[in-house]
Image (cartoon, helix red, strand yellow):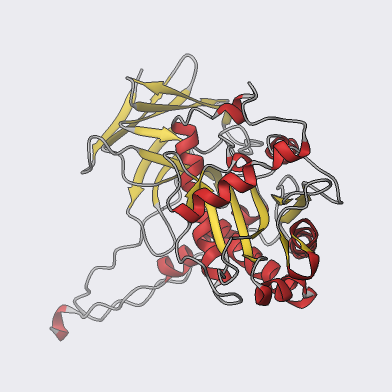
Amino acid sequence: MIAFWAIALPGSLHAAAVIEHARLVRDAGNFRLELDLSGAPTSYKVFTMQAPDRVVIDLDHAQLRASLRGIDLANSPVRNLRSGIRDGTGLRIVMDLAQRVSAQSAISAPTAGNPHRLVVNLQAPGSRMASTTRPVTTPSLAKAPTAPRPAPATTHSHPPAKLRNVVIAIDAGHGGEDPGAIGPARTHEKQVVLAISKALAALVNRETGYRAVLVRTGDYFIPLAKRPAIARRAGADIMVSVHADAFDNDTANGASVYALSQRGATSETAKYLADRENRADLIGGSVALNDKDPVLAGVILDLAMTATLNHSLQLGDQVLKSMAGVSRLHNHRVEQAGFVVLKSPDMPSILVETGFISNPGEARKLRDPAHQKRLASAIFTGVKRHFERHPPDGTRIAWEQRQRSSRSEQAAVSTTVPQPSIAQR
């Protein structure tokens, strides 16, 4: 026996809707699967199947970026969540069930702070389905209707114990026999950026829901290709590589933020700096740029790499905007170049150039511990703004965002605009 609901939605036949986040929500004894999408799918259908019992969600022209493995299914009718590609461009998500349920679905348009959202309500036999729509109030012949009593909140005041922290890998550039750029008064880039990185790590570790991992903790050399590998082993969600610029012209000034480029540098300055930073492996003597390691030879930028790059650009934009409050900017957009340290296909990464160490005035500021802390604070502010918009599934940050969203939705549902009665019209 198969029961299904199919809905066609307006949209481009070529623009894939990407599922950014997925979660199973418990609400007054009922359960619902929520899928946050980058856009509306061209069409979707939800249906149930038996022998064995399962709920199937088919979306046309859709992709899954969220992880289904970290979703808490304990004490729910769902035993397992799995997904697969359907008809080349479509997506199928299957909920394997421990008991038979009925399913109802709806998709909501984006609102302030919330994306497109596909909600699949699961109802066990004999239970009452919780309403997910705003109550409709009809005019009365005798008097205007009164606002209904707000429904009790269903949010939880304490986060589940299984939630993890957002992990930020902080990579202080250069180190050891590679001093990086050397500015006036023998200011070494490797020393300045390590101090900024440690200040940033201290801020991160003081913030609930975040954890910092320092890729380099002292004055020693790490090959470029190994830096993202260290971050990945630590379970990092992103990597922030901290550097200080240098240029032939000592009047060059300002902070910059870089992401990886798929097609070359966005400016001559970006190309120059990438070439200089990438030579660090030759200085260290352990890895050559023509090594057969695929990270150094060049990553084939497939769909996963494109998604990672998009998140890197979004992250970089937030960090750059935040840094504008504490430093002059060399460029008001995120630059792109082929930095080896950014070539990670599965981890958003940015490179922050905190200022020009070749500029005497900026070198003096970069040596100042107070300015180093201001730079660290600005970087972390941008990082937090990014994760407020894109919290990784299974993290405390994602849970807190859902709590805020749930409270906002409950406030909207409990607020009814009085309608005039027919007698008053």
**Nearer the observer, 334 or 132:** 334
Vertically, is 8 above or below 314?
A: above
Q: Is residue 294 left or right of residue 32?
A: right
Q: Is residue 28 among what the camera can see? A: no
Residue 30 x, y percent position in the rendering? 53, 44
In the displayed orientation, state which residue is furthest to the front. Answer: 248
Residue 22 x, y percent position in the rendering? 51, 42
Q: Is residue 279 among what the camera can see? A: yes
> Residue at 31% of width from left, 32% of height from top?
61
Image quarter where the N terminus lies is top left
Image quarter where the C terminus lies is bottom left
> Residue at 38% of width from left, 75% of height from top?
147
In the displayed orientation, state which residue is furthest to the top. Answer: 51
Q: Is residue 301 left or right of residue 159?
A: left
In the displayed orientation, state which residue is furthest to the bottom. Answer: 424
Could you tell me how many numbered marks the image carries?
0
> Residue at 35% of width from left, 61% of height from top?
134
Vertically, is 212 above or below 260?
A: below
Residue 252 x, y percent position in the rendering? 55, 68
Q: Is residue 51 left or right of residue 142?
A: right
> Residue at 22% of width from left, 40% of height from top?
12
